[in-house]
Image (cartoon, coloured by chain):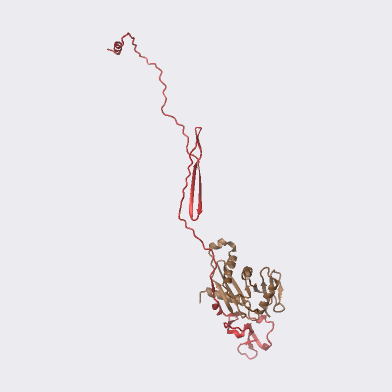
Chain colours: A brown, B red
Amino acid sequence: MAANNTLGYIIIDGSEALIRGAALVTDAKGFPVDFVRTEPLRPDQLSRILYGESFGKYAKEKLVLESLLDAVETDPQLWICNDPDILAPLRANSRIKSVLLEESPHVPLDAAGHIETTADLGVFLIQANTNGAPFRAEFPGGVKPDEIQQTAAILTEAAQTMNILEPFARVEKALNFLASGVR
Amino acid sequence: MGLRDFLAGLIPRHVDVYTIDDFSIEAPETVSMIKRVETVRMKPEISCEASKIYDAGEITERLKARAVNVKISGKKVTSKTYRIKRYVKEDVKTHRHKLAGKPKVSNMTKQIQAVPLELSNVIKSMKKRPDSLRNEAVLACYGPIVEGGVLKLALNKQRGTLLVWYKPGSRQLKAKYVYLIRRLGLGGKPEWRWE
């Protein structure tokens, strides 16, 4: 990994009635070095009526995502998200490389670090692990080829010391734990 | 003495005085003193404009009434125009509705550091197992895990996952996989092996 060998994860979930978000920055092992989360956002009916159908996207981008990015103290070398709604705003607001990462059912590529294009614009297969299927990596519009290469290199190096997608489940678990009110 | 003799005595000359018995004078024309007055309905057409203006919490209700010109008996009678303004001031409370704003953000790094990593069994996706495990029955494989930074490991038997707690502040980065094995032929308990 680069000198700043950290990965950042952004999780924003919920419905229009309740939206919550969290940002986790981990070290190369996946151990948390920075974690911020929002209080659950419960917009009332009137707000949802006034903003209309765009409310969910607005709330994710402008209310939750910007709040999280403002609060995070450690800038990771790469932001990873799992929601297409926030991929482009994440890149624009953080000015840090960003990628939407998911598991894919694809057969493993030749070797770790390999990149393969797909039929979808801005979507690539990246073989980060030596074992298992490649990741489906979606990049924000207008991404440059060298940024894709750099992202693949970061993921490949991180995959040597941690399970890259595991933090999503951990953050989800932590949010549920905090929401339960048990301390 | 009758009237005739009396009158004859007052007048010095001979006057023939006749008795008028026949008052055949044409009766005078009489006119009724009750005047007929032609009446014209004075009720004018009135146009009303009423509008309600909401302005800074005050309702101003303006009612404007205006009489139109009315002609009576060929003479143009211009009625005066009256403009009636009625302002109704009421205490109308306005409410500033607070729309959804940015949520409060809390830093909870300490709390999440206590949450273990949960690793799935990757034995099915392993391309090949280490040579040192050739004679072992490999039950599960978890990783990569930085062995030198591990504080505690626990197997979640229900989910088949491995829970990993790391020591805070550990700078170890050499990662390995940990295998759950059972030695063939010995019937012993499963054991963990770092490779």
Residue ID at (61%, 86%): B148
Outermost residue toward the top? B14
**Residue B35, percent from left and from top:** 43, 29
Q: Give the answer, above or below, for where A156 lies relative to B19.
A: below
**Residue A32, percent from left and from top:** 58, 78
Residue ID at (58%, 78%): A33
**Residue A12, percent from left and from top:** 59, 70
Between A130 and B179, which is closer to the camera in this rendering? A130
Q: Give the answer, above or below, for where B121 lies relative to B16.
A: below
> Could you tell whether A51 is left or right of B42 in the image?
right
Outermost residue toward the front? A3
Task: Please state the total of marks drawn on the protein image.
Answer: 0
> Could you tell whether B79 is left or right of A160 in the image?
left
**Residue B98, percent from left and from top:** 52, 63
Does residue A61 appear in this view? yes
In which quadrant will I find the N terminus of chain A? Answer: bottom right
Does residue A134 appear in this view? no
Q: Quadrant of residue A139?
A: bottom right
> Could you tell whether A64 is left or right of B21 in the image?
right
